[in-house]
Amino acid sequence: MLVVMKSDFADEQLVAVLAHIRGLGFTPHVLPGDHSVAVGITGNRRALNPGEFLALPGVKEAIPVTRPFKLASRDFQRRDSEVRVGDVVFGPGRFVVIAGPCAVESAEQTLRIAHKVKAAGAHMLRGGAFKPRSSPYSFQGLGLDGLRILREAARAVGLPTVTEALDLRSLEMVYEHADMIQIGARNMQNFTLLQEVGRLDKPVMLKRGMSATIDEWLMAAEYILEQGNSRIVLCERGVRSFDPYTRNILDLSAVPVIKGLSHLPVMVDPSHGTGQRDKVIPMALASLAAGANAVMVDVHDRPGEALCDGPQALLPEEFQSLRTRLGRLAEVMAVTLQPSAARASP
Ligand code: PEP
Ligand code: MN
């Protein structure tokens, strides 16, 4: 239920509405709007009767919200959310480019690649220290050492970082070392992990599960929102399908679908989405054209030696070319590539 206050409501009336909702055992969420204030209600397991709220002084409308997700939905918040990571802003009218190796392999490798992606115009550095691998015999990541390496490299080049937390133990470490916490496809429905992330004061990148519907993905975001953390960027990374020509089917139509359903920023990972280097640039450009707020790509200067996902990594010069083309396309799309307002403003 969404309770919309009249434009001239009195503060005591809002307080009374909040108290009424709490009295029913539900949770009110105050949602400031352009002309008035709305109050979203969560925690109800049965449909609510709009009449009960319309009867309260100062209330203009009571709108039933039929979607399973509430806080993530456009019904609860009309305007697009902005999620800030340092100086970088994910939100309307902007486009963020994240790049880096799939995995942190060594201090030298990470620093080398960090310098290259920064020079080419990346806004954030990626790199996994805890790697979710299909085989227990594959490289599992450098763990805490990897987080330290990523942070050092990022500081050296002046970029914020995003890296994956695999479980509650690694989450503590990622929280300490990274600027944004990545929840990977395999963990999209790890509800205890989502709740824990929801209690943290750090932005989250929530990847789509490899066989998740869009409703399931938004419900996963709802787990984080419901705990109080609203700094979420959704990441489309492809879904499992029948066709072997690409690693996954990158669902770019999810971008406009999400834009209709939710106020959360959405980004695309065409590297994991396609699994093949030569498909990454076209799909990254298409992501911007489809209305995504960001793109994240794997970059490696020696992909043949990469310990993880070498075949999908762009070479630094390919990334440079992509970045240049994204800049041109951004003009056509009337969106601003970072640097963000913080740095661009006088
Ligand atoms: C990654 O980005 O490193 C990764 C493992 O991605 P995903 O969770 O989408 O497979
Ligand atoms: Mn990978």
Image: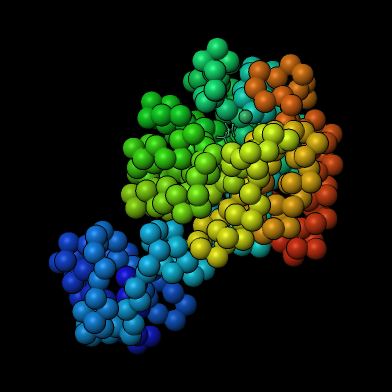
Q: Is residue 188 above or below residue 218?
A: above
Number of residue marks: 0
Query: In which quarter of the view is residue 195 placed?
Result: top left
Question: Among all residues in the image, which is located at the extreme bottom?
Answer: 8
Pick the residue in front: 158 or 307: 307
Does residue 152 show up? Answer: no
Give the quarter of the image for residue 41. bottom left
Look at 34% across and 37% down and name the residue there: 192
Quarter location, residue 240? top right
Kindly identify the residue that appears in the image at 40 percent across and 71 percent down.
32
Quadrant placement of the C terminus:
bottom right
State left or right for residue 36 relative to residue 184: left
Q: Would residue 73 be found to the left or right of residue 316 on screen? A: left
| Residue shown at the point (39%, 48%) measured from the top left | 224
Q: Quadrant of ligand 2?
A: top right
Q: Nearer the viewer, residue 136 or 227?
A: 136
The N terminus lies in which quarter of the figure?
bottom left
Residue 276 lies, with reference to residue 214, above or below; the image says above
